[in-house]
Image (cartoon, grey):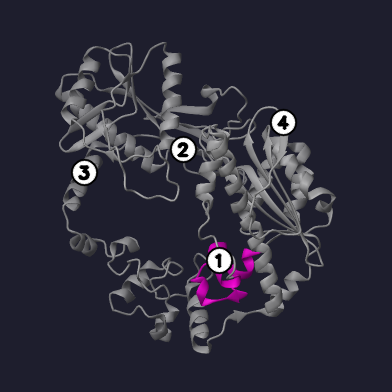
Amino acid sequence: MRLGQVIEDTLKTYLEKKYNTTALDLMPSIKKTEESDYENEDEDEDDVFIDPRFNREQAIQNTLQAIRDGVELLYQPTFAIDDCLVRADFMLRNSDGSYSLIESKAKANVRKNITDDGKPKPIGKIEDKFIHDVSFQVYVINKVMEQNWLPLIKDTYLAHLNKDYLKQWPIDVSQLLNIEQLWLTKEFTVIQRKKDMKIIRNDSLMDIVSIQNYIAKMKAELILSEEEFNQHYPWEGSKYLDYFGTDKPFWTIMGSWVTHKPDVVSALYYQGKTDILLLTEDEKVMFEKQGGWGTAREFIDRYIQCKTTGENIIHANIIKEIFKWFTYPICFYDYESVCVPIPVLDNTHPYQHVIVQYSLHKYYPDGHMEHFGGLLAGQGDYRVEQITIEDKPNVVGFESEKIVYGNYKEFLQEFLKDIGDEINNSTFIVWHQGFENARNRETWEIFSDLADSFLKINESTFDLKDIFWQSYYFDIAFKGSASIKKVLPVMVPSMTYDGMEIGNGSVATQVLYKLLDNKIVDEAERIHKIKKLLLYCGQDSLAMVRIFESLEKVI
């Protein structure tokens, strides 16, 4: 909701400036509770509960009066008829007295992908979910307008983010946002199978009969009890079945690692066959289709083997073969990023995962280590401040952590400085390399003079997660997961994320964004948050080191 509000505010300012007007804010007054007992790991003192009750009739009448008065730009107008409620984003008055509807989306990709010259490109028709959304709004608004002898919606537009926009201060909203007209059909040419192919793109809204059928279906189902609903939809995801409580046994056919076979799981569930150990050979065969992480059948067999023998499955020779190719110093590193619709830093795109923190542990052949940590805490004139974390756990032989101020490129160069000349002979270790490798590719696409360095890192990278993802090391205690949060407490019981003030990536991202956006003004609190972020990111890279050491001992 907050991300969506940022885009709405930006679009609102743009429309007001473009049409030299002031939007009439028709957002109904909403009650905010003064106190909240809601507990959240990222508790924010500004967060409050929202009471959704408001005076619907008053909101509708205010909207209709604004339309009769000919207000040029309406923000959050409200319409309701036949149990259907719409609160639109914007309505813009046309010269003939009618209005156009502008729907705002905090999305960078709203179109379906079409292959063009060997690459999938988001140039197809608008995704159905967005068409359905706008169609419903137009349907309700026009019914209300017709009932009140007012002109119907003339044109409809979808405003969304331009994912190719590269921020340079100040932000150019006309380039940041794409405002596309719907109800249009367009013909264009793409290259498919080495031939020019004509594509007809239809962005038409849903027809009225289809909308009415959907509404009738929803009305009929919203009144159903949970039991009746489950009978209609016996396998609409795990949350609708009573069995899926927080106390459910993980190693059953209901485990998340096997639910990509919903038809099989559903059939066995209703036969009362949920215990993996009691499955027949014919029932196991039903899980053999490839999907997700390996095949479900493979996991079932591994689980039964571990339960039967009481031992983990360890392919020591494969792990040894992998490790023998590692070159020293091994650089274990981890990134933290921010990903927001409107770029904060110059030379970044909407929704780009922008690297704003790193942790690097250099591991030498004799086992000693050096640790480097960096965090981009603000923009402006370039400077670097060393920081010391008192009573830091898990200190290694050498520690260097710093706060960086400056632009995006200057921060990335600090990371390369910490790697130094050893970039040419090191093996780089990450956990889930798809993330770090993608960030490095984005970096060299933006800053060509850094391309060689980040390309070398990617070419020398090994994903430690693969040892567990490929089940070269399989332990029931991982609960079917290769997440570092699941593997670490099993492989290295002395290390834990429990009790850390910032203990997961989503919380870290939020705090990092607040720092960059100057939302933390108290200096003591700012330094406190920076230290906690450095501790969290440092834990991630050191956790990889300790898991690596544990594997070495095992093999």
Indicate which label's residue lies in the foreground, 2 or 4: 4
Is 252 displayed left or right of 507 in the figure?
A: left
- Point out which mark residue 191 bears: none
Q: Mark 3 sits on what residue?
A: 215
As shown in the figure, which amino acid type bears the numbered disc 3?
A: Ile
47 magenta-colored: no
Residue density around tag 1, few if under 14, some if 14–19, many if 20 or more, within 10 Å: many
Secondary element type, mark 4: loop
The residue mark sitting in front, 2 or 3, is 2
- Neighbours of disc 2 within 10 Å: few (<14), some (14-19), many (20+): some
Residue under label 2: 107
Q: Give the alpha-carbon distance from disc 1 to disc 4, as whole Å.
A: 39 Å
Closer to us: 124 or 321: 321
Q: Is residue 249 above or below residue 391?
A: below
What is the C-alpha distance between the residues marked 2 and 4? Answer: 32 Å
Q: Is residue 531 left or right of residue 384?
A: left
**Residue 482 tag number:** 1
Q: What's under tag 4, amino acid-wise?
A: Tyr
Q: Please state the horizontal and vertical placement of residue 389, each as a whole percent of the image.
A: 65, 49
Name the residue at 51% across, 35% down.
341
The CA distance from mark 3 to mark 1 is 42 Å
Q: Dot 4 surroundings within 10 Å: few (below 14), some, or many (20 or more)?
A: few
Q: Secondary structure at mark 1?
A: loop
Tell me, yes or no, if residue 193 can be seen here: no
